[in-house]
Image (cartoon, rainbow, N blue to C red):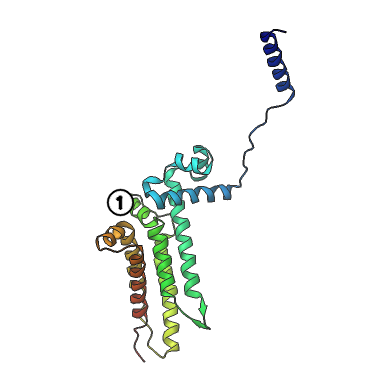
Amino acid sequence: MSGVAKSNLSRASGEAKAEIEPKRETKRIRRSADEARRLILDAAEERLAAQGPEGIRLQDIARDVGISHPAILHHFESREGLVRALIARTSTQLRDKMLTALQSKHNGEDVVEANELISNVFETLSDRGTARLLSWMLLTGRSPENTTSGALVTEIADELHQRRKEDAVKHDKSAPDREDTLFMAILTANAAFGDAIIGRELAKDAGLDQAGVARFRAWFAKLLHDHAGEVKKI
């Protein structure tokens, strides 16, 4: 048999085999709507932390997750919808962490762990890029009205103030002023926003490395802790 004939026979045999054996389709990963939203938000958060607000590009996030661009639009309607959902989620996570820390008990006593509180605030608002994203929305005329961020400071201040009042009663001291506690919460938020926007540059210019930044945050936590305890005897 000639080489050409053998080649034709081999090709015909292959085609016949292909007709007998159905093509294998790539299995699609079926996810629930909640799981898909979580994965999309996780990918968006990673890009936000690494690249800032400009890093939240739907096509890039779709590629990270392994879905189509329209799939993101299906869950969030638009890029801005995704941004608002991301802010809402991180705000809720921060709220839960803060309230847990404020309501926790150590050695049988209610104690506000200042270092843990400040660490949670800076990690969520600054390190994860949430403050930069909020600032970008405000500066470009996009109000984050549909998120939980607006009430977050007030809610945390209320819980913190309750702990301060209980502590004052235990130590026979006068109750602290509610506005003073609110100012502490606002100062913390302002510090975290400032750290997110220009903090790294300031630290670098001042000769502080990452360990130095951590020491600053610990110093700030102690500053607030000491102030919180400055209530007068009855």
- Where residue 36 sits: x, y (%)? 56, 47
Q: Residue furthest left?
A: 205
Who is closer to the viewer here, 82 or 178?
A: 82
The residue at 52%/83% (across/down) is: 107
| Of residues 145 and 198, the one drawn nearer to the viewer in this rendering | 198
Count of numbered labels shown in the rendering: 1
Q: Is residue 218 left or right of residue 203?
A: right
Q: Amino acid at mark 1?
A: Leu
Q: Quadrant of the N terminus?
A: top right
Percent position of residue 16, x then y: 73, 18
Would residue 123 appear left or right of 27 to someone viewing this image?
Answer: left
Q: Quadrant of the C terminus?
A: bottom left
Query: Crowding at label 1, few (<14), some or many (≥20) Cα neighbours within 10 Å?
Result: few
- Residue 225 relative to residue 93: left or right: left
Q: Position of residue 114 (x, y in %)?
A: 41, 74
In the rendered view, tell whether residue 234 sits above or below residue 60: below
Q: Using the rendered view, name the quadrant where residue 144 is placed.
A: bottom left
Q: Residue at x 34, y 88 (%)?
A: 232
- Secondary structure beneath dot 1 equals helix
Q: Which residue is mark 1?
A: 139
Q: Is residue 46 above or below residue 204?
A: above
Farthest residue in the right direction?
20
In the picture as drawn, the residue positioned furthest to the top comes out as 2
Residue 19 locus on image (x, y percent): 72, 21
**1 shown above or below 229:** above
- Residue at the spot x=32%, y=62% of the render? 209
Residue 99's place in the image compared with 163, above or below, is: above
- Residue drawn where x is 37% and y is 87% of the image: 174
